[in-house]
Image: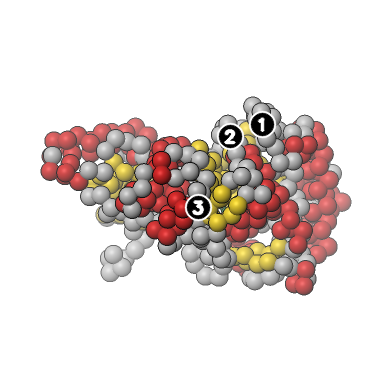
Amino acid sequence: MTVFWQKDLETMDRASIERIQLERLQHIVKYCYDNVPFYHERLEKAGATPDKIKTLGDVERIPFTTKDDIRDTYPFGLFAVPMKKVVRLHASSGTTGKPTVVGYTKNDLDTWSDLMARLIVAAGGREDDIAQIAFGYGLFTGALGLHYGLERIGATVVPTSSGNTEKSIMLMHDFGTTTLISTPSYALYMSEVAREMGYQKDDFKMRLGLFGSEGSTVEMRNAIEEAWGIFATDNYGMSELMGPGVSGECERREGLHISEDYFLPEIIDGATGETLPRGATGELVITTLGKEAFPLLRYRTKDITRINYDRCECGRTFARMDKVMGRTDDMLKIRGVNVFPTQIESVIVGMKGISPNYQIVVTREGFMDKLEINVELIDETLLERFAELENLQHTIKDKLRSVLGLDAKVNLVQPKQIERFAGKAKRVVDLRNQTKEEK
Ligand code: DLL
C-alpha cells in the first residue's frame, strides 16, 4: 500500500490540479507585477499584465526568466519581499562570476520542508530511519533542504556533510544509519572507501539512498545499489527554484513526480523557445506557483527531459519527468554529433571488469574533434593480459559507436586513477577552446 505525506494533494484529479495551478498562476503573476520592478517592466513590455492571464495556456504570454536575469540583478534584485521578511539565503556557486542568490521567507521554508517530506515518503523514507546527510552544508541547498524534510517526517538526521569520508563511514556503521543522502558519485566513492576500511555491505544497516543534484543513469543507480545493498531514488531540483524538492521518484521509479501544485512545468525547444507538445523531449521551464521571497516566472532550467502525464501505479497523480538527460550547456557537439555524458555513462557503468568511474576528454586536432574516454579497470593485473585488455577496449568502443554514432578512443587506466568527487562529479574535460599554452 502506498504511503503518502499529503494524500489529498498528491492524488488530486487533473482538473483539480489545473484549477489550483491557474489560481496560483494568476496570483503569482500579479504578485510579481506588484512587488518586483524587474517583472513589472517585463510583463508590461510583453503585454502580459496580470489581467491577461485567463487560462493556464496564457503562461506562454510571459517572457522567460534566465540565469542571466538573476545575475544582472545580483544580489537581491528579484526578491519580492523586504529583507526583514527573508529568513534564509542560499546561493549556487556557478563556474564564472557572481553566484545566483536565492532567498526564503518563513513560509517558504515551511513549504520547502513539506515538499521535501512528500518526496522522502514517496521514496520510502520513514520516521524510524536514521538518515545521514553527505551533501555539503553551506550555501548549497541540498543538505539543508533534505535536512528539514527528514526532520519533518520524524527521521533521525545525522548531518555529517560531505568530505571526511572515513569518519562519516565509521559513524554510518556505529549509528546504524539506514539512509544515505548524497550525490550518486559520492555514494559510490563512499562505498569504495568503506571497502578499503575493511567493511562489507552487511556490516551496515543501510536500506535506502536518496540521491540527486547531478545526472545519473539507471546503470549508475544499479552500481550504487549493489555496492551498498540499498534501494535508491533520484531527486531533482535547483537552487533558483527552491533547491531539492521540485521532483523525485516514488518507489516505482518510472519518472520523477513534480509537485505540480507548486511548480508549473513546460517543455520548450531550447533553440527556438517554442513550447513543445505534451510528451516531447526538450528544455524544462518552470514557473514557481507558491514562493514568496524569490518567485520565478517561466524560468529556463536548461535541463533536458520529458514529462509524462499518465497516472502512476503508486496512486500519485502529479506528472512525472524523465531522469534528466543532461543540460543544454553540457551537451557536447563532437564532429557535428550531439552527445550527452549520460549516454556514455550508460555504456560504461555496469560493464564487467571496469569500475563505474570514468572521464570524458574532448580535444581538437586541426579541425577535428576527438573524443576520448578514460575508463578504470577493477583488476590491475588485466594490464598484463594484453589480449583480454584489447578485447575489452574493443567491446567498449563498439558499444559507444552504436549508442553515440561516433568513434571514441578508449583508454583503460589502472584502478583508482580517475578522480573521485564529494559533491557533483565533473566527468567532462573539454579542451577544445584552450590555446596550446593552456594545455
Ligand atoms: O543541485 C539542488 C538539489 C540538491 C537537487 C540535492 C537534488 C538533491 P543546484 O546546485 O542549483 O541545485 O543545481 C541544479 O543540478 O539544473 C540540474 O542540471 C542538476 N540536477 C539537480 N538534480 C538532478 C538530478 C541542486 N536528479 C542543477 N538529475 C540542475 C540530473 C540534476 N541533474
Residues marked 2 and 1 touching at CB (< 8 Å): yes
Earlier-in-chain disc, 2 versus 1: 1
What x and y, as percent, mark residue 321?
60, 38
Q: Disc 3 and disc 2: Cα gap in Å?
A: 25 Å
Which residue corresponds to mark 3?
175
Q: Amino acid at mark 3?
A: Phe
Q: Residue at x 67, y 47 (%)?
A: 153
Where is residue 115 drawn, in percent x and y?
69, 48
| Residue at point 36%, 36% (across, down) | 350
Mark with earlier residue (1, 3): 1
Residue 43 point in image, percent of width and height: 77, 58
> Quick one: SS at disc 1?
loop
Quarter of the image for residue 165 reads bottom left
Residue ID at (22%, 50%): 414
The residue tagged 1 is 2
Q: Is mark 1 within 8 Å of ligand 1?
A: no
Mark 3 vs mark 2: give the one in front.
Answer: 3
Tell me where residue 359 appears, x and y as whole percent. Answer: 34, 50
Q: SS for tag 2?
A: loop
Quadrant placement of the C terminus: bottom left
Marks 3 and 2, the one that precedes in the sequence = 3
